[in-house]
Amino acid sequence: MDEINQDNGKEKDNAGLDLASRLTQDHHQSLKLWLRMLSCTVRIENEIRSRLRTTFDITLPRFDLMAQLERHPDGLRMGELSKRMMVTGGNITGITDQLEQEALVVRVPDPKDRRAYSVKLTREGHIAFAKMAVVHEEWIADLLKDMSPDDKGQLIALLSQMKQHLQ
């Protein structure tokens, strides 16, 4: 049964703590860190999205799909692309359809499973992606140019640590 905290009149839960007393400075700091990382990511992503559209007339998801395929010259199945890009299969199908219409990717039957297809970059796709990737890297370098190499190295190390803790 819930009881009333005599000190501040707030209800306590069965564990004997109200919400405010369960929050610690680390909770607040963790939330602040997450929001700061999210804010930085969104700002960079929005700028890259705009530049890709203006410079290459391509969307960020299409660029990302091509980047995945560049890393896997033998191609990737649609389900694998969906997992790697963390989007639905329907989104992958739509993006692939668009890139296929532009002759940048091709669907090929999977030799291991005749019911499935792999997606590969075409020769034109490799050429187009190579040009975009060079410029994309320059944009990222420009956006982060005001951070010192030491700060970047420290941030990479800390985020790598965080990634390990989250796995």
Image: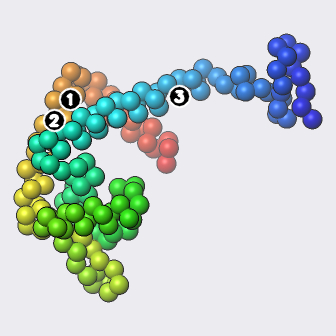
Disc with the residue nearer the chain's start (3 vs 2): 3
The amino acid pointed to by label 2 is Trp
**Residue at 77% over, 26% down:** 18
Where residue 71 sits in the image (x, y, percent)? 22, 59
Residue 31's disc is 3
Crowding around mark 1 (Cα neighbors within 10 Å: few <14, some 14 to 19, many 20+) is some
Where residue 1 sits in the image (x, y, percent)? 92, 35
Crowding around mark 3 (Cα neighbors within 10 Å: few <14, some 14 to 19, many 20+) is few
Whether pointer 1 and pointer 2 mark residues with C-beta atoms closer than 8 Å, the reply is yes
The amino acid pointed to by label 1 is Leu
**Residue at 90% over, 27% down:** 3
Outermost residue on the right side: it is: 1
Residue 157's disc is none
Is 64 placed above or below 94 here? above
Q: How many marks?
A: 3
User: In this image, 162 relative to 128: left or right?
Assistant: right
User: In this image, 78 relative to 31: left or right?
Assistant: left
User: What distance separates the C-alpha of mark 3 from that of mark 2?
Assistant: 29 Å
Where residue 50 sits in the image (x, y, percent)? 21, 38
Where residue 43 sits in the image (x, y, percent)? 31, 31
User: What distance separates the C-alpha of mark 1 from that of mark 2?
Assistant: 6 Å
Q: Which residue is mark 1?
A: 143
Outermost residue on the top side: it is: 7
